[in-house]
Structures are given as structure tokens and as C-alpha cells.
Amino acid sequence: MAEYLVIVESPSKSKTIGQYLGDDYIVKSSKGHVRDLSISGAGGLGIDVQNNFKPDYVILQDKKAIVKELNDASKKVKAIYLATDPDREGEAISWHLSQVITTKNKTVKRVIFNEITKSAILEAFKTPGEIDMNLVFSQETRRIEDRIIGFKLSKLLQSKIKSKSAGRVQSAALKLIVDRDKQVNDFVSEEYYEIYAKFSQFETELTKYNDKTPKITTSEMADQIIQSLVNPMTVESLETKRRLTESKPPFITSTLQQDASNKLGFNSKKTMQIAQKLYEGIDIGNETVGLISYMRTDSNRMSQSFISIANHYIESTYGKQYLGSTKQSIKGSNVQDAHEAIRPTDVSRTPELMKSHLTKDEYALYQMIFARTIASLMKPVQRDITTLLLRSGEALFKATASKQVFDGYLKAYGKFETPEEQEKNVLPVLEIGSKMTALEISKKQCFTQPPMRYNEARLIKEMEDQGIGRPSTYAQTIDTLKTRKYVTLVDKKFIATEQGNKTIEQLDLFFHEFISATYSSEMEDILDEIAQGEADSMKVLHEFYHYFMPMVENAQKNMEKVKPQETGETCPLCGHKMVHRKGAYGEFEACGDYPKCKYIKQKSSDNLTVKKALNTLVPCPQCHKGTLIERVATKGQNKGKKFYACSNYPKCKFIAPFRATDKLCPKCNKPIIVDEQGVVRCIDNIKCAYTESDLSA
């Protein structure tokens, strides 16, 4: 019978770990968080602000069965190991688990590992630790503050401008996109000229004129310079220098997302899903094993034991001359020593050997991670850069050529790095002071270009550079902006929608500080300080709340409420003006006198559409709530023909079983129809009994 219960986050991870620990261990999965803030209390925050921001945690509805299962399992063992992910969020999950499962008279330990391999797992269980409450407080502070900002701003925007949500990280990222759009739209292109001198073997460009970098703004200026040139030109200098290009460090979360976007065409969400799978475990036939280390990390450090093995791989695969420096650096002020870069767990499991066990996308990402890791430990690329300067009166022309003399880390990473453009020029051996006659001297018209819009890779890099959020949140943040329809993608570049622009416009007016990159970055620094035990979470929350809430109150009073745009039509039921509205299923047209009048114009659906929206005021015989409205079929064999259906669509999908005509009742002026018995009569056979005997109507 098992003596120990191990709780991890994902089912696939539990399967992998279970095979390493043996029969004494039960390995269960929590499937992520099991508790979160409730939506009860003042403002639905799930936080008792007056009682030192006491959180009201509830078990998530879809996790109640899992919690019961974990509780049942915990009663049968003597010790519980919490083995959630090695980050702030994972620490919080472990703490929440310790609060909801039976731990009385049980030993409860925290187990941390950076990779899911047999050796790493067994070693971690030899030295279990305790839950780091500073990390828990840090996560809890972030959750409480983001809940307050998110709920307060979202409710405000929904009521004022019909935007769906806002948040500290989400809105700061959206502001980057909106601001870049403005830069692009406001950009005024300026004309300028470049001057080139072409020789038989190479081409040079004018780089100095009168000892200054030339700024040639008109065609006439370019012509004047060309006319002043002396041809043949004199060789002023010819110099060759050796340039070393160092390899990049191994991947961290943000750089993995950027390169996967640029080189593999993966969006950030897809990248993290694939990386999660590679981390949690791949079935390679005789065992299930994690192929990469933990993929949410800010550190580019690698363990010395791994470096030693990787160096042996480099030496045996490429040769000793490719071995580079083993110096290590750590990115980020909050990096824990246990964290490593994203790297393969075992260099003997090469991408080629693993290819048959991976999908096409898994293989592509694993191959890039493997190559980047190995390349980071290899020698730099060596190139000889030759620079030629030619003097022509007051002008100086320049040509360069590059020659690779040692491929270095490109031996492993060449496939994933765009090679430095080899100069078209092949520079001959020339003597200083010798003369060269240009075959052609020409000008080239150019125009300044606006800044580039953000694609996913550039947006992630900008968020990282400005400290907006954490790399582990980038994928979710970008996905939220798309889901909320705040941005759209054009040629894989983000453009803010009308609603996105409207959202930032209002937030900028009333909450400029809270949606700025500066605030988000400073908040992340404060959360790091709480995680390290250097800041008090209660003090942080009190200062934030008492500064933020007056802004909310001011916005409630002064933010202008956007009125619905009129359609130009009138409501067929009450005559009030129709307006455009937005709902859970998109835009629709409705009566502007809501809630007094609840008329909604029906959209095209399958073969149905509203043509005149003529309401007969005849009660629907099926639901008794709507009335029969005239419609026109837009598809199928009945296309163009009138029919009658319930105004309460889509709640009621009743279609009347009679045929419409073009006649009106001489008594009540309502439509004449042919019913299912072939009787030609008024549609309102309850209030009006008019019928005709002419069946050809």
C-alpha cells in the first residue's frame, strides 16, 4: 500500500513522475489552481478590504471533484509532497492545496525540480523543503491588486463605453499597440537621396561630404554633389579587422516566444503549449520523459553538471576547437537559484533521435531549443571585415566586404540564424594613394519609413524591455487582447480596433498612471521584493487602494457615457429610434427605448432575414411571447419569398405554416395569407374573420 501522496499540476506530469517513484507513491494531479477569489462581497471582489484585504477563497466549481479525490487519497498516506511548478504561481497552488486537503497528523513537504527526468526527480525527493510563504504572499498581492484593478476598470468601461475588460498588464500592452498605431498614422514620410559610385568589381556609397554625414533632401542637392565629385577617385584607406560575433545565451521564456514567432511562425500561446508538453513528458517508447527544463524562467543560467555534459557533446560532435566559454549570467533581479534556462534535459536525446516520437511542431521547437543551448556554449563566429575608403574631392565613399573565417556556434545554430549578408563587393588588393575610376555615379531616391507595427515577437520584446508583466503572462495577455477584439492582425501585425482605441483613450484620461509601462514595471519590482521578504504586502495593498479608488470615483462621475449610434430606422413596435448595440454574440440593432421596448431586429440566419420587419401583432402560437413578423428568405429554393416567423427569435424559432401573398386585408389592412388548408384569409383570424373564396389569390 502506498505511503506517500505526490500532487503535481498536470495529468501528463503525474504519469511521467509516477513511473520514477515506484509503488510507495501515489501521484495525483490538481490540474492547476483549485481555489480562487470568490465573486462575493462588496463589488464582487471576493476581498474584505476593510479587514486588511482578507481574501475569500473558494474551491473552483470544476475542481470540487478533484479536491475530494485528493482528500480521499491524503487520508490513506502518512506524508504529502506538493510538487507543483517551480515558480511563484506554483508555490501558491501548493499553499492552496495544503489548505483544502487533509493534512492533520501528516508530514507536508514542498518538492521543487527544474526538469522531469528520473535523476532530477529522485534527487528532489531526497531534499524536500517547506512552502515559501513569501512567494505565496507575492502571488496573493498580485492577484488581489489585479482583481481590484480589473473588476473596477472593467465594470466602469462596460457601463460607459461597452468595452469588455481592462487590467494592469492587459491595458499597458494595448497602450503600446495604440501608441504605435498613432506614430504610424501620424508619420510624414520625407524624401532623401543616397549617392553611389559603381566600379567594375564593387560598389561604394557616399558616407562623408565636407567631413560631415551628408543629408541630401532634394534631387537638386544630389546633382550638385555629383557635379562636384572628382573621378578617378583616390584610395584613402583599405583596412581589414577580425570581428567576433558571440553566441546568444540559452532561451528564457520571452526569447523563446520571440524566436518561435520569427523563425517558426508560432504565436506565443502555441509556443507555450508545445513547450509545456516537451517539459511534462514525451513517450519515447520505453519511458515517458521531459525533454526540456521548465519553460517559465527569467534565468539564462545552466547547471555546471549540464554544461560539462554539453561540452563533451560539442567536442565529440564538432571538435574541440568549437568549445567556447562556460561563463554564466543570470537575467532578472528576482531569479531564484533553482531556476535554469530552457534547455534539453539530456543532450544524448538529439532532435534527430526524438523526431519519430514528436509531432512536426514539437520537433521544430525542440530542435531550436536544443540548437540554441548547444550554440550558447560554443566559440564565436569569426569574420574578416574589410573597409575601403575612396576620396573624391570633398567626398568620401565607402565599401565593405565580409568573409567568414570560422563558423563557430553557427555550426550548431546556423539553421536558425539569418546569416550576415555577404557583401556583393569583392574588394581587390589596392595600394593607398592609387587611383580608381568609377564607371557610374548615380543618385537613389529614398523615403523615410514609419516605425514598424508590432508583430508578436516585437510586442513581447517591448513588453519585456519595459517590464510589463512577466514572460509567463505574455501569451495569455496577447490572447486576451485578441479575444476582446481590442486588436486585429493584418499581415501578422497588430492594429488596434476602434474599441481598442476608445478603451485606451478613456483609460489615458482617467487612469494614465495605472496603464503605463512604468507602473506595471514598478509593480513587478515590488512583487519581487515581497517574494524576497523585503516588502510588506499589506502596506503595498493599502497604499495602492487609497490612491486608486479616488480615481475610480472621479471616472464614475466624469467619464462620458457613449450613446448608442442610431441606425436611421424606427422601431416597428413603438416608433422609437433604432440604435446599434453590442451583446455577447456581437453587434445587433434594437429599439433605443430599452427597457420599455425590447424589440430586436433579427439578423440573417441560415435562410432567414428581416426585410421590412413588418410586425403583424399576431401572437406567436408556439411561445405566446413574441408576435409574427414578416420576413424574406435569402437562401434555398424559397429565396426571395415572404414568410412569417416569431419576433422572439432565436429563443423561439417558430415559422408559420402558411403562404404569404401580396394582398392586404380590406377590413384591417393586415397581410392576406393562404393557410395550410388552402383558405385565403386575413393573417389575424382571431380579431379579423375575413376570408376569400378565390383560391388563386
Image: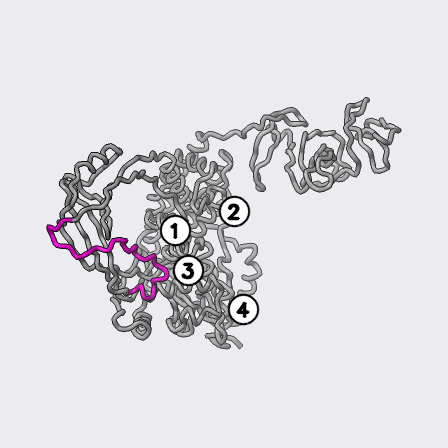
Range of magenta residues: 408-435
Residue depicted at 42% across the width and 35% down the height: 505
Marks 3 and 4, Cα distance to the nearest angstrom? Answer: 21 Å
Marks 2 and 3, Cα distance to the nearest angstrom? Answer: 23 Å
* Between discs 3 and 1, the one toward the N terminus: 3
Marks 4 and 1, Cα distance to the nearest angstrom? Answer: 44 Å
* Between discs 4 and 1, the one toward the N terminus: 4
Colour pattern of the rendering: one colour
On screen, 489 above or below 224? below
Residue 75: image x %, image y %? Answer: 53, 69
Whether residues under marks 3 and 1 lie with C-beta atoms below 8 angstroms apart, the answer is: no
Is residue 3 among what the camera can see? Answer: no
Dot 3 lies on which element?
helix
What kind of residue is marked 1? Ala
Residue 470: image x %, image y %? Answer: 38, 52
Residue 385: image x %, image y %? Answer: 21, 56
> Which label number is shown at residue 73?
4
Corner quadrant of residue 271: bottom left
State the residue lying farthest toward the right.
693
Magenta stretch: dominant secondary structure: loop
Residue 229: image x %, image y %? Answer: 17, 39
